[in-house]
Amino acid sequence: MKQQNSSYTEKDSDKHKARILSVIKNRKSMSHNIAIKSRFLTCDECNGKVVKKKVPFKHLGVDLGRFDAEVCTKCGETVFSAKEVGRIEQISKEKGVWGLSSKTKVGVSGNSLDIRIDKKIAEFLKLKKGTEVTVQPEGKDKLAIYI
């Protein structure tokens, strides 16, 4: 086992252990670990160098701002600290995009099936009664609704 640099403290170790992994890579969520090797942070997946910088963050197409993150210079993996994840969550709530998913049941209307859309989602999408939408299957277990 390699001896760690003396500037790396127990407090730093606790910070890394407590880190919430929120990874955005190519706009898809993934879960990877960032490990400390020698004096530098390195990416577990590609061994690339990890640097600290501010990165933009969007949720449901809404820009939430720029946040401090550790980003792999090789593969682009982005990891936010627990503090930054808290800030992202708070801003999401303030902008009304937090917790917009909901479960619903398929109902019957005449000879057709219908799906009810939660009021919060309808308000976010600015849907009103009579709005025309396109419903399209995107596989055996996924249904898309386009406005």
Image (tube, rainbow, N blue to C red):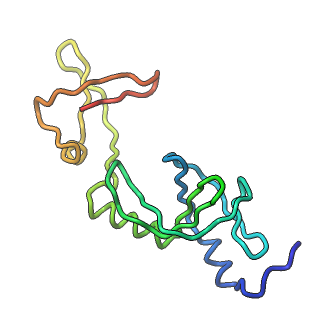
Identity of the residue drawn at 36% across and 64% down = 65
Whole-percent x, y for residue 16 in the image: 64, 72
Q: Quadrant of residue 118?
A: top left
Identity of the residue drawn at 31% across and 36% down = 104
**Position above or below: 12 against 115:** below
Quarter of the image with the N terminus in it: bottom right
**Position above or below: 134 against 70:** above
Q: Is residue 126 left or right of residue 144?
A: left
Whole-percent x, y for residue 18 in the image: 60, 72
Q: Is residue 114 left or right of residue 130?
A: right
Q: Is residue 112 left or right of residue 23?
A: left
Q: Residue furthest front?
A: 73
Considering depth in this image, is 128 or 61 the residue closer to the camera? 61
Q: Quadrant of residue 94?
A: bottom left
Q: Quadrant of residue 129?
A: top left
Q: Residue furthest top?
A: 111
Whole-percent x, y for residue 54 in the image: 48, 68
Whole-percent x, y for residue 115 in the image: 26, 29
The number of callouts visible is: 0
Considering depth in this image, is 15 or 7 the residue closer to the camera? 7
Quarter of the image with the C terminus in it: top left
Identity of the residue drawn at 43% across and 69% down = 86
Identity of the residue drawn at 59% across and 55% down = 76
**Position above or below: 71 against 14:** above
Considering depth in this image, is 118 or 8 the residue closer to the camera? 8
